[in-house]
Image: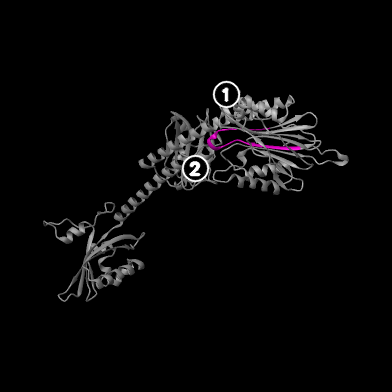
Amino acid sequence: MADRGAPPAAVPLPDDWPARPDRSLALNRMGSFDWDLDSGLLHLDPAALAVLDLLPGEYGGDPAALMSRIPHADAARLKALAARALKAGTARHSAYFRVRPRNGAPRWAHAQAYLGHDAGGRPRRLIGVVRNAERELAQAAARSDLTEARRRLTGVVTRTTALLARASSVEDVLDVLRDPEALGHLTAVSVMLGVVEGGRIRLVAEGRAGSYVPELRYTRVDDAFPMSEVVRTRRPRFIASREEFRASYPLLWPYIESLSVASGAYLPLIAQAAPIGVLGLLSPLPGAFSDEERTLLLALGSSIAQSLQRAMLYEQRHDLAEGLQQAMLPRRIPDIPGALTAVRYRSARLGRSVGGDWYDVLPLPGGRVGLTIGDVQGHDTDAAVVMGQLRMALWAYTAEGHPPATALARASALLRELGTERFATCTYVEVDLAGGGLRIVRAGHLDPLLRHADGRCEWIGTAGGLPLGLSAEFAGHGGVGYPVTTGVLGPGETLLLCTDGLVERPGVDLGDSLEALREAVRTGPAELPALADLLFGTVGEPGGGDDMALLLLRRDAPGPGGAPGTPQAS
């Protein structure tokens, strides 16, 4: 391949036509050589000497004189190639090698030769041509680099798009930006995400710790920052040099100046024809982005925009439903003389929805307290509404003085009358704090767990009835009631009620999960708040697919003179 980037050799045009082979070679920056293997002399014509950066007076035919122009490693490799060629007796050979010029870095050359034999088959001469191959190899390397860059960028988009398809929250989207197998393959020292909020842009995260460029945590859309410009124009902004950063964004330059940043790309995140955010990429490599790079980056921005919008909608829906559900749960747990209590609740995160788990602590006359915990079928706003209605109904029935079995039967009938086609599980426990007596009624729910004062733990086996809403269907066929199980809660003993979200796991036997909960309670801390935190943090699956509710009550051991201890709620 001709080297169009270097000046032509000083060879005059031939007067004759057609040109002789030596003139043709010289005009195309190729020289010839002839190596007499008997004498060891190697002839190089002037064009070949020029390729090796030798003057005619510097070379007398001894190949050893070429060692000043060929690096030792390349000379050894050429010698080994020649030895194998002579041994094999093959006719045609070629090789690339480096030339060390008088000034400058080594450059590549290429030699091609024909091995001639005498009548007896003995190799006699090696005749060939030598040429400058620097531009040829540079172009091949550039093609290889381009192919690798295409593969890398395509892999970035493919990997990132696959991860974004599973993102269901803004935090999930941010995790993709930090993922080393996704955007980590981009040559970027900082990957930033800004979210549009009214007339402002809030920078929510950066994907490279330690190289975050603080364009201020909040900026206005009309500010002179690249993110603001992208939101206003809805067009990407590509910055090719540090000089362009300094000239175009003087407010940002003080933050860029100390970083190894030489170029940047800011991509609008547009969903439903409106900008919802900006993706910023800062690279240590200078230069304009190619058309192919820009196309791939815009495809990446489109995937992030769709995922971000979906995540924001999920979170808005979840926040609304969770706010409704929280409003229907008790705002505070009342102080119960003679008892300590602790409650915990966490809504489901899978699907960004909520369910109908609830708990309640109901002070009753005569030193008694009612404990309820339950779970309405489903994970949606309707489940939360039904939960609120059931909780208030049970509160009303017990406040009217109805015994536990009657309160659950009436709640079941109410749920049936609501026409929601939902059912609910529930456990209701009435505790006499003076004597420790227990009355337990269970509607398709988990049994209570009892921790004795000495740390022993056991499940209280209770007779159970059908879930609320289902039992009412059989009212016209003789009725289905709720049997009452009695027991005793001794001084210093703790009662635990929970919903199935705390113990049910896909692929895990329920019996094994219940045993793990029992063991965690047995070995857990004595303080109720610490025990509740432990159970939610270790037994309960973080970010699980179901609501979790937990209610703990400990009957106080008598204090000096037989008085109960000081109550507390948490």
| Residue type for callout 1 | Gly
Locate residue 349: give its quadrant: top right
Percent position of residue 137, x then y? 31, 56
Percent position of residue 536, x then y? 64, 42
Q: Quadrant of the C terminus?
A: top right
Relative to 478, is 289 on the left or the right? left
Q: Is mark 1 on a helix, strand or loop?
A: loop
Q: Which mark is residue 419?
A: 1
Relative to 450, is 305 on the left or the right? left
Q: Quadrant of the N terminus?
A: bottom left
Task: Say whether disc 1 or disc 2 marks the residue closer to the N-terminus.
Answer: 2
Percent position of residue 239, x then y? 43, 40
- Asked whether the viewer can see residue 45, the reply is no
414 vs 170, nearest the viewer:
414
Q: What element carries label 2?
A: helix
365 vs 474, nearest the viewer:
474
| Residue type for callout 2 | Leu
Q: Which mark is residue 177?
A: 2
The part of the chain drawn in magenta is 340-359
Q: Is residue 129 above or below residue 504?
A: below
Locate residue 513: give its quadrant: top right
Gap in angstroms between the C-alphas marked 1 and 2: 46 Å
Magenta stretch containing residue 350, yes or no? yes
Q: Is residue 106 above or below residue 426?
A: below
